[in-house]
Image (tube, rainbow, N blue to C red):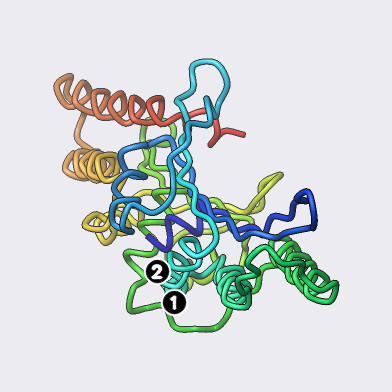
Amino acid sequence: MAGFFDAEGSITIASFNTKTQKRHQLRVSLSNSDKKSLITIKKSFLNFGSMVKLGRASGIGGPDTFEWRLGTRQAACFLEKISPFLVIKKGEAELAIKFQNSLYRTAGKFLADSEIRGRDLIKQEMTRLHKNRYIDAVDYSNYLLPYTAGLLDGDGYIGILHNTTPTVTISSTELKALEYLKINFDYGFIYKNRECFRWIVSSHSAKKFLEQLLPYFRLKGSEAALAIRFHDSIKSNNRRPVSKVELDNRRRIIKKIMSYHLKKGIASRINN
């Protein structure tokens, strides 16, 4: 859950003007094209919040995107549950909890100007954290596998490169988070794209990586199992001429993985 939220979640402090005075509100959201997974997460947190349909994420032909939204005390309660396990958004979650706990019931009374300024400062700090996240040095090894599976569910890609090589990619704007994963798993390499960093694991390392994460996936378990199966079909060949039956089997696996990509709308995003 924490990895999934680090990939697809959002924490903000909104400000708005009422008829009488400026107010602030904590808001948390989690977006994905898989509505069933969001509903499952929502139910696991006492059905807090609301579900909203945002529309198509990838233009014409892309899947609908849904968003689970939480506000005020429910948002803080959710963050208190997952904050110890977050990596990328840990600082934002801790600040959000501190903000919500500092509020008090006004019973319709005016807030002092100093109180409004204080809340504005916390909002500014949240904006700063969005741009400059701090990845602390806490040891996450005890829950590294479920966390990474959640991150891959949210910001990851599983495919067959050039129709020959199983490949796994996790994208993030946080280089330190990817470096932490690379060091702990000792697989792959990291490169910078136009908008983010990508950690890429391929071939036999991709198979080993996916086998470790397979029990923890929420969304990409089927793709992971197919990629492992594809690798095994190549490995068992032992450089013998590939029979038509084997070739057709590999094509079916690739086609099946691509069907998951198209369903989730990630086939075009990974190439950007």
Q: What is the x, y in percent for residue 129?
A: 70, 67
Name the amino acid, label 1: Pro
Q: Which quarter of the rendered picture does the C terminus lie within?
A: top right
Task: Rate crowding at label 1 as few (under 14), some (14 to 19) or many (20 or more) other CA atoms within 10 Å.
Answer: some
Name the amino acid, label 2: Phe
Looking at the picture, does residue 112 appear above or below residue 265?
A: below
Tell me the SS state at disc 1: helix
Looking at the picture, does residue 201 appear above or below residue 219?
A: below
Q: Residue furthest bottom?
A: 138
Label 2 close to label 1 by CB (< 8 Å): no
Question: As drawn, is 193 to the left or to the right of 101?
Answer: right
Q: Residue at x 81, y 74 (%)?
A: 112
Q: Considering depth in this image, is 111 or 253 the residue closer to the camera?
A: 111
Q: Considering depth in this image, is 19 or 120 the residue closer to the camera?
A: 19
Q: Of the numbered discs in the image, which one, if any, rests on residue 185?
A: 2
Please tell me how many numbered marks the rendered image carries.
2
Tell me the SS state at disc 2: helix
Task: Rate crowding at label 2 as few (under 14), some (14 to 19) or many (20 or more) other CA atoms within 10 Å.
Answer: some
Q: Of the numbered discs in the image, which one, if any, rests on residue 84?
A: 1
Q: Which quarter of the rendered picture does the N terminus lie within?
A: bottom left
User: Which comes before the other along the chain, label 2 or label 1?
Assistant: 1
Question: As drawn, is 231 to the left or to the right of 179?
Answer: left
Q: Considering depth in this image, is 209 or 155 the residue closer to the camera?
A: 155
Question: As drawn, is 132 to the left or to the right of 69?
Answer: right
Question: As drawn, is 63 to the left or to the right of 174?
Answer: left
Q: Considering depth in this image, is 125 or 2 the residue closer to the camera?
A: 125
Q: Residue furthest top?
A: 60
Q: CA distance from mark 2 to mark 1?
A: 21 Å
**In front: label 2 or label 1:** 1
Q: What is the x, y in percent for residue 38?
A: 36, 45
Q: Residue at x 24, y 39 (%)?
A: 226
